[in-house]
Amino acid sequence: MYYYVAMQTNSNPESVSNKYRNYVLVMLTLVYVFNFIDRQLLTILQESIKKELHLSDTQLGLLSGFTFAIFYVTVGIPIARMADKGNRRNIVTISLGLWSIMTALSGLARNFIQLLLARIGVGVGEAGGSPPAHAMISDYFPPAKRATALSIYSSGLYLGILIGFLMGGYLNQQLGWRTAFFVLGIPGIIFSLIFYSTVKEPRRGATDSNVVIENKSHSLGEVLRLLYSSKTFVYLALGSGLHVFCIYGLVNWAPSFLARLHKMQHAEIGVALGLIFGIGGGVGTFVGGFLTDYFGKKDKQWYLKIPAYAILLSILFAAGALFLQDNFLSLFCLGCCGLLHSMYLGPAIAVAHSLVPAPMRALTSAIFFLVINLLGLGFGPLTVGLISDSLVHSLGNESLRWAMSIILPMSVVSATMFFIATKKLTADLKLKR
């Protein structure tokens, strides 16, 4: 059941200047930058951590994937419930401070269990980042600009990877992996105070036209039933989850892949991957949002068609990245993968938010993130690690190449899910009206 009430005239958005609206978007994007600096930092450091703590690839997959993801997605649900009823600015502030502290504490770990507990803390903190931020952006930006705004926010993911890989690789080689956790964790604590002091909480539904939003809370069951009844959301979440499986199966293991099979040094890997994933991913995220907002004016199906075509095209470059022997060509293909892989997120969130009332948006984002991160972040790195460990005795370092190649068939399935969701979108939007 929807809790929108039709009006005869448009309800004007909150009287917020464009300058301040854009400032809030920049601040939320920077929060997301810190999110992915702290999330992906372990990835660029993992070969040094593996050597010092004597870890297996499966354990690395648990640290960078499943263990982080399981706490990230489960804690995200109750936090999103609070965000749909309470002050989202405060939740983002507390979450940023918590995950930054736990990142810094990761540098004190002396064994696998201690590092695992620190990663759990990072996951719990980051659970309160994106769902409240998504809801705030949807209340600051009207539907016609929402995918672009959410894509700009999502570009923080790749800027975070850029900084994390560049700084993490340099600090790891010069001062060690423990120092890298300290140096990159502490600034987030300071930024959380700046964010709290300068960002205001928007009114819920402020940019939704022709509606008045009832001040009613929604149970998790209500939101789940509504989303499950939307075939668009079901296929979109599954397609996105499988796509994220491929993203993390590639990105999280790329540093180890380049070190083991291309014999590159830590600082060299950090610079290369930071630039190609950071810049390529950021450009792809913005282009995905811009193109879908542009073509979606006439046909909403383009919000899902463009990501689907991008995923299909990325398969060719993923194969090149994994099997071309030349360092430059492999890195070039990785960069193209980063650009194409990143085009889905802003449009996907915009579509998900278009299917539900404003008071359900934070919880909708949390449920969407639960699916994509459990499937993708949870099982992507772990599956690659398990396959690599199972093949290492027969293939040696080549085991990682063949383990990572699982992303090729998974991308085909993911794109298929997006195309199915495209067919369901028009009917679901008509039902909402």
Image: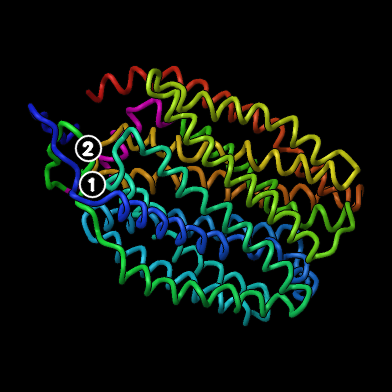
Question: Which residue shows up at 56% across the image and 27% down it?
Answer: 308
Q: What residue type is labelled 1?
A: Ser
Residue under label 1: 219
Query: Which stretch is magenta?
Result: 217-234
- Where residue 392 sits in the image (x, y, percent)? 86, 52
**Residue 129 seen in the current view:** no
Q: Does 10 lie within the magenta span?
A: no
Q: Which of marks 1 and 2 is nearer the N terminus?
A: 2
The quadrant where residue 321 appears: top right
- Where residue 88 sits in the image (x, y, percent)? 29, 59
Q: Which mark is residue 66?
A: none
- Where residue 12 sits in the image (x, y, percent)? 15, 40
Q: Is residue 281 above or below residue 69?
A: above
Relative to 211, 297 lies left or right? right
Question: Which residue shows up at 52% across the image and 35% down it?
Answer: 288
How packed mark 1 is, by other alpha carbons closer than 10 Å (few <14, some 14-19, many 20 or more), is: few
Q: Quadrant of the C terminus?
A: top left
CA distance separating discs 1 and 2: 22 Å
Question: Which residue shows up at 27% across the image and 42% down it?
Answer: 221
Discs 1/2, front: 2
Are the residues at dot 1 and dot 2 in contact (C-beta closer than 8 Å)?
no
Q: Which amino acid does label 2 sit on?
A: Asp
**Residue 367 seen in the current view:** yes
Q: Is residue 376 above or below residue 317?
A: below
Residue under label 2: 208
Relative to 235, 416 lies left or right? right
Relative to 49, 428 lies left or right? left
Q: In this view, does 422 lie above or below 168?
A: above
How packed mark 2 is, by other alpha carbons closer than 10 Å (few <14, some 14-19, many 20 or more), is: many
Relative to 129, 167 lies left or right? right
Question: Which residue shows up at 44% across the image and 66% down it?
Answer: 125
Q: In which quarter of the image is the N terminus?
A: top left
